[in-house]
Image: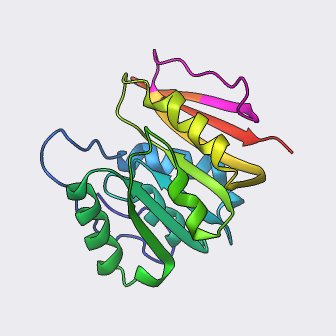
Amino acid sequence: MRVIAGKYKGRRLQAPRGREIRPTSDRLRESIFNIIGAEITGHNIIDIFAGTGAMGIEALSRGAAHAVFIDKHSRALDVVRANVEALKASHHGDIIRWDAGLNLRCLAALDLSFGLAFIDPPYNKGYADQALKHLAASNAMVPGGLVVLEHHHLEGISLQDKGMALQDQRRYGKTLVTFLRIMV
């Protein structure tokens, strides 16, 4: 895995062995970032179910102001920490051990508003819809902010009572990438 573009372009990222963490492939990450383009610059971003931290790191590389990486697995967070430290970007990120499947109350303590959120939960476990619900309840996103959700193409999500509107969806093999806009 490598950073695709920006100030860290070409830098290698660590990824743990095994099936516990499913990193977003370089190709899919490049497609997502080509779609969202300038939505990144100057925004605080959240990488929920961070895994390796590749999405948040790519956003930092492309001009995000600050990244918050959230995952419940200490092994994943060790990889995120190693990747962020290798890029000397620790001052641009917070790494939080938290179960986003339960809630996102951890965001309240940060006193940050976010313009972009990446959510890439384990597939077919109901976490995609739960994470959207918890993100909406956190009130951490700015009006007009963008949520990029990676989920299995057969895993449904509901936007009812979440204050989000569907902007776009793209299918890449078994992965469906859903782009949601925070309603003003």
Q: Does the magenta stretch include residue 156?
A: yes
What is the chief secondary structure element of the magenta stretch?
A: loop
Q: In this view, does 103 lie to the left or right of 148?
A: left
Depth check, front residue: 92 or 167: 92
Which of the 4 quarters of the picture holds residue 181? top right
Q: Position of residue 135 (x, y in %)?
A: 60, 44
Which of the 4 quarters of the picture holds residue 9? bottom left
Q: In this view, does 143 lie above or below 137?
A: below
Residue at x-position 73% and y-position 34%: 167
Report the quarter where the N terminus lies: bottom left
Q: In this view, does 91 lie above or below 84?
A: below
Report the quarter where the C terminus lies: top right
- The magenta stretch is 152-169
Residue at x-position 36% and y-position 24%: 125
Depth check, front residue: 100 or 24: 100
Q: Is residue 161 above or below residue 27?
A: above
Q: Which residue extends farthest top? A: 154
Q: Does the magenta stretch include residue 4?
A: no
Residue at x-position 64% and y-position 49%: 138
Q: Where is residue 85 in the image (x, y as percent from the top left)?
A: 31, 79
Residue at x-position 29% and y-position 79%: 86
Q: Where is residue 54 in the image (x, y as percent from the top left)?
A: 39, 58
Colour setting = rainbow
